[in-house]
Amino acid sequence: MNKFTTSIPTKARTIIQKALQNKRYELLEPEAKELIGDFGITTTRHTVASSIKEAIQAATSIGYPVVLKIVSPDISHKTDAGGVKVGIKDDEGVEVAYEEIMKNVKKKMPDARIDGILVEEMAIPSTEVIVGGLRDPQFGPAVMFGLGGIFVEIYKDVSFRIAPLEECEALDMIQEIKGSKVLKGFRNTEPLDITALAQTILKVSNIMVSLEEIKEIDLNPVLVYPKGVKAVDARILLSRL
Ligand code: ADP
Ligand code: MG
């Protein structure tokens, strides 16, 4: 991909326009995943269901195991609301998880509007990283990288670059965090796909440069494999212009 790529996928524009028309400044997870998918970032296959029956149908067509998640314009942190269930193995599991999510959300966030339940493929567990995009009032679009979980939250072990950036800069961002050894493989763990991860950082850079309406992107987590990467969560915030 060229550093100055300017072609903007039309689907991405439509998703943003629809949200802004409805005065929504945070995309729903399925919208955010469609947008990043349009820019070539691999995400989990998914469907939004509005009943247990639909959820079971979706799970059957996606293939078990699946993950169920709440879809609500009022909930950004789904786990905090009891809105995520992973590793669901069969139809009965879907029914139990669906009811539990609804019960948790009604209890923890009684006023939240609910658009449905996201049914998605369960990605094979692997090392989790965060790839982010932000718009700095002074420097403009920028990208962020860090290892998932406590590495970012407690150790603040992250790297930043101003967008757009070159592939070598994306690779530098990955190498310069203190925890980068985790990605390179040690003793009995395989080295992970740093090239694919660098491409994901470049794609987030491209999104930030191409779509000015986007204020912030949070791909948390992106799972990194020996071959390829997969974004299993995506949050996109829009500016209130
Ligand atoms: P939250 O809004 O709480 O950040 P996430 O969508 O990130 O919700 O889900 C919480 C956690 O569940 C993720 O950090 C990841 O470890 C796991 N997870 C979510 N979706 C999937 C999936 N499709 N496959 C595998 N693990 C997943
Ligand atoms: Mg998340």
Image: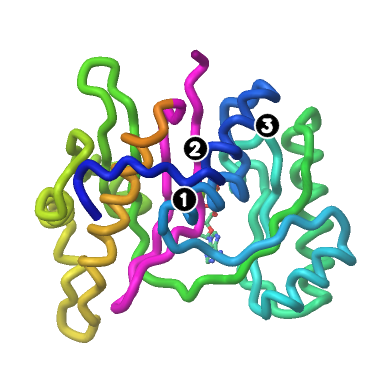
Residue 200 percent across, percent down from the top left: 32, 56
Gap between marks 3 and 2 measured at Cα: 14 Å
Considering the whole magenta stretch, tell me its main secondary structure.
strand
Q: Which amino acid does label 2 sit on?
A: Ile
The residue mark sitting in front, 1 or 2, is 1
Q: Pointer 1 and pointer 2: residues touching (CB < 8 Å)?
A: yes
Q: In this view, does 229 lie above or below 83?
A: below
The residue mark sitting in front, 1 or 3, is 1
Magenta span: 213-241
Instruction: Check disc 3 and report the residue beneath it.
Output: 74
Which one is in front, 155 or 127? 127
What residue do we see at 37% from left, 51% from top? Answer: 149
* Element under disc 3: loop
Q: What residue type is labelled 3?
A: Asp
Q: In this view, does 21 lie to the left or right of 145?
A: right
Image quadrant containing the N terminus: bottom left
